[in-house]
Image: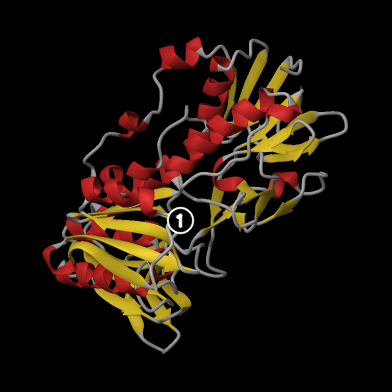
Amino acid sequence: MPEKERIVVVGASAAGLTTAEALRREGFTGTLTMVGEEPRAPYDRPPLSKQVLAGAREPETTALRQDADLGRLKAELRLGCRATGVDTTARTVTLEDGDRLRYDGLVIATGLRPRRLPFGHDLAGVHVLRTLDDALTLRTQLLGGPRVVVIGAGFLGSEIAATARGLGLDVTLVDIAPTPLAAQVGPWVGDLVAGLHQDHGVRLRMGRGVAGLTGGNGRVTEVVLDDGARLPADVVVVAIGSVPATDWLAGSTIPLGDGVLCDSHCRAAPGVYAAGDVANWPDPVTGDRVRLEQRTNATTQALAVARNLLAEPADAVPYAPVPFGWTDQYDAKIQFHGRCPADAPVTCVEGDPRTGRFVALYQEGGRVVGVLGWNSARALHAYRGRIGERVPE
C-alpha cells in the first residue's frame, strides 16, 4: 500500500468512527486523528427522533463504542473542536483553536447541518433536531404537554410527529408536499403514511407552506401558513431537511456542490476522500451523482473509503452500494432497498396495504429500481435481488 504516516478523519459520528476502525483493521499503524465538532464521543443518531425523544432510551445508550473500545483504536480524539479549513497543497487541516494537523490522507465525514427557516428561530420553543443535545432539550419541552407543530414531513419530521403523538400531545404536521414522505417514497406510500398519522390523531396540513411564526414575550405562539391559517403552537420543530456540512471547506481546492464532489472511488482530491451524508459521487451504473442520507450508507461507504485510501490506485474499487433505509412510526416499520422515485410506478407484489403488511416494487426505465416493505422485513429481503431486473411488458 502507498506509504501513509498520518491520517486525519474530520467528523466523529458513524461514518468517521467506522472509517477510523476500518483503517486500523486494514493495517494502518500510523498516527490517526479524529476531529469532532461536538464534545461527545461518537453516538448513533437514528434513535434521537424516536426512543430518546420518547424517553424510552437513556442518552448514554446511543454511544457507538465504549471508552475501552475507543482506547483500543489508538487514535487522537479532538472532540469539541471544529475544523475550519484545509490546505490541500500543504496537506494540513486547520482547527478553530489554531492548531494545524498534517495529513497524508484525509477523510471528510462531517455529515449534515439542519436547514432553518428564514425567520422565527430567535423565539423560544422553536427547535431543530440534529444532535443528542437537541433531542434532550426538545424532550424536556415535550414533557410540559405543549401543542406541537412539526414543519416538514420527511423521515425526521414524520418520526418526531409520531413520537410526540405517542406521548399524548396535540400534534400538527405541516408540509408543502401533498403527502408525508412524498419525496422519499412517492405519493402511493405517502398516502398510506398520511392515513397512519391521521389514525393516530395527528392533524395534517399538506400542500401548505409556512409564511411566518408569531410569538409573545419572546416565545412562539403560532405558525402562520401561506393560506392564512394560524396554528396555535407552544413548541415548533423545524424538520425541512439538511445541507451537507461543507462550509469549513470554502476557499479550499476540494470540489463542492451538493456535498463533497468525489469520483467513483469516493476520492475528492489527492489523498482526500469523503464518506457518509456529506459525500457526493457518481453512480457507477447510471453515472448520476448520488448523495445518500442513510445510516447504513455511513457504514458501508466508510469501509470502502478506508480500503481505497490505503490501496494502490490500480486496486481502488468503485463504490456501488444498494441503498437501504428505514423509518419507524407508531407500529409501522417501513424499510426499502434501492431507490423509490416519487414518479415511479409502484406495484404491490406481496401482502396487502389494508392489513398493514406488504411489499412493493418501484419501476423506472423498464427495470425494478427499488423495493419497499411495510412491516415485512423477511419478505422484503427475498425481493432485494430483483433490483435491476427487467420488468415484463
Quadrant in which the N terminus appears: top right
What colouring method underlies this structural image? secondary structure
Would residue 19 be found to the left or right of residue 376 on screen? Answer: right
Residue 106, picture quadrant: top right
Q: Could you say where residue 186 lies in the image, as x and y percent from the top left?
A: 39, 70
Would residue 391 be found to the left or right of residue 111 on screen? Answer: left
> Which residue appears farthest toward the front when viewing the image?
392
**Picture layout, residue 15 above or below residue 288:** above
Q: Could you say where residue 183 lies in the image, as x and y percent from the top left?
A: 44, 68
**Picture layout, residue 334 above or below residue 201:** above
> Which residue appears farthest toward the right when viewing the image?
89
Residue at screen point 11% across, 64% down: 355
- One can see residue 23 in this view: yes
Q: What's the amino acid at mark 1?
A: Gly
Would residue 288 be found to the left or right of residue 71 on screen? Answer: right
Observer-nearest of 359 and 250: 359
Q: Could you say where residue 9 lies in the image, as x and y percent from the top left?
A: 63, 29
Report helix, strand or loop for mark 1: loop
Observer-nearest of 224 and 347: 347
**Picture layout, residue 313 above or below residue 84:** above
Q: Residues within 10 Å of mark 1 (few under 14, many from 20)?
A: some
Numbered disc total: 1
Quadrant in which the C terminus appears: bottom left
Observer-nearest of 155 and 372: 372
Residue at screen point 42% across, 52% down: 129
Which residue was labeled with disc 1? 388
- One can see residue 125 in this view: no
Q: Could you say where residue 43 lies in the image, as x and y percent from the top left?
A: 42, 33
Observer-nearest of 338 and 36: 338
Residue 227, picture quadrant: bottom left
**Picture layout, residue 198 above or below residue 77:** below
